[in-house]
Amino acid sequence: MKIAIGADHGGYELKITMATYMKKQGHQVLDLGTDSTEAVDYPKYAKLVAEAVASGKADRGVMIDGAGIGSSMVANKVPGVRAAMAYDLSSARNGREHNDANLLTLGAGQLGANLAAQIVDVFLTTECTEPRHQRRVAMISDLPGDGAEATISPVATLDYGLVDLSEEDLQRIVNRLEGLVGGSAGTVFHAGPCVGSCPDTARQFIELGARRLTSGPDSPGSIPKDVARYIDHTILKPDATLEMVAKVVAEAREHGFRSVCVNPCWVKYVADGLRGTKVLTCSVVGFPLGAATSDIKGMETRKAIRDGAKEIDMVINVGRLKGGDDDYVLRDILAVTEACRDGSAVSKVIIETALLTDEEKLRVCGLAKRARANFVKTSTGFASGGATAEDIELMASVVRGAGMEVKASGGIRSFTDAKRMIEAGATRIGASASIAIVQEAQKTTISS
């Protein structure tokens, strides 16, 4: 494949690295500059890359500046170009699968070289094949342009590199990116991996070269020391009373669990009880059978978020999945994930592993990834079995590359159980035996 690549001074070094990498992958690379770290204007180079793609001189384009946003805006001014900014593997895949993007923009200030290379790989190898997406791409292409060729005025050279951005500029960029992925600036919860909520995932992102991670309540530490921050302290029994829920809230405040997970009728009470703490309120949707209609699940999600839920654990329609109706299951999950994005809440998809074959587990994890869920979760705790390390590894193998996480739930009653799940790839634990897990972890810390 012939790839046009360009960058401003802020993206120059990453451009050289990516050009070298793509050549090693067998691609023909057309380098359109810039050729040094001397300050230049990114619109000039974004236009050159876009025109190379639009004219057919290149099959695809890659443009790199400090944040990736401005170059995307410039490139999309050129007729025939569909530029997409990507900040992780999921956004790169979505840009190709859904929008047939032919030009990728990257922010050198937001990505390390390893993660950038993986994003480029996804962008170059993913195809837009589904008819409904192709129809929408055709609609984009049919939109009339302004008919005028863009001209870059010979203004004084300005330094748009990340080095010269003010803290206010950086915060605006971060706020915009959070908005794009469904987050909300200034909130105390995070729609996706963060240092405090999932230490192991944070370590993996750091290894991939990520430079900026959402700052959660704690830094990554040893599993015994920070195990409470993995745990959703759960009470989902049908006979749970107000006194029982109040006890769980008090325990969560004392031990600093990640969240308290309750049935919808208790959400407002729990949210009020946790106010002023770092512990989140989590609710379940379509629980425990997953057989409610998708519109009801969507409404249930929105009501729980209005009542104070910051995380939603939804149950898929298992029967529809086993019957091969993947389109229905995808729509079912989307009803919840879209409501979560609207309400800036984290979405978790319970797939009920005990009822599925390995092939079905892989399929539904792929559907959750397409729906842009934040987590896949093993179990409700109401089926014939719960979480296993093997299932965690299988689920993680599908979703980890998209920046998603895995929650282990069902039958986790000891620190030994929790540790085994975390080591298999879980970044969240759902448990009603949370106190016993923490107490055992404390003894392990003392003995070591």
Image (spheres, grey):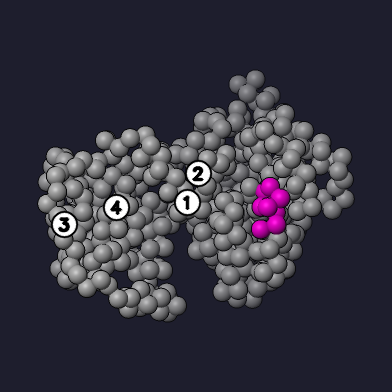
**Other-residue count near label 3 (Cα within 10 Å), few / some / many at <14 / 14–19 / ≥20:** few
Tell me which numbered mark, 1 or 3, is placed earlier along the sequence: 3
Q: Nearer the viewer, residue 233 or 39?
A: 39
Mark 4 and mark 1: span between their CA atoms?
16 Å
Residue 186: x, y in percent? 52, 40
The count of marks equals 4
Tell me which numbered mark, 2 or 4, is placed earlier along the sequence: 4
Residue 412: x, y in percent? 70, 44
Mark 1 and mark 3: span between their CA atoms?
30 Å
Q: Report which residue position mark 3 lands on.
A: 152
Residue 307: x, y in percent? 71, 50
Q: Quadrant of the N terminus?
A: bottom left
Q: Secondary structure at mark 4?
A: helix
- Are the residues tagged 1 and 2 within 8 Å (C-beta)? yes
- Are the residues tagged 4 and 3 within 8 Å (C-beta)? no
Q: Residue at x 64, y 76 (%)?
A: 323
| Magenta-tinted stretch | 302-309
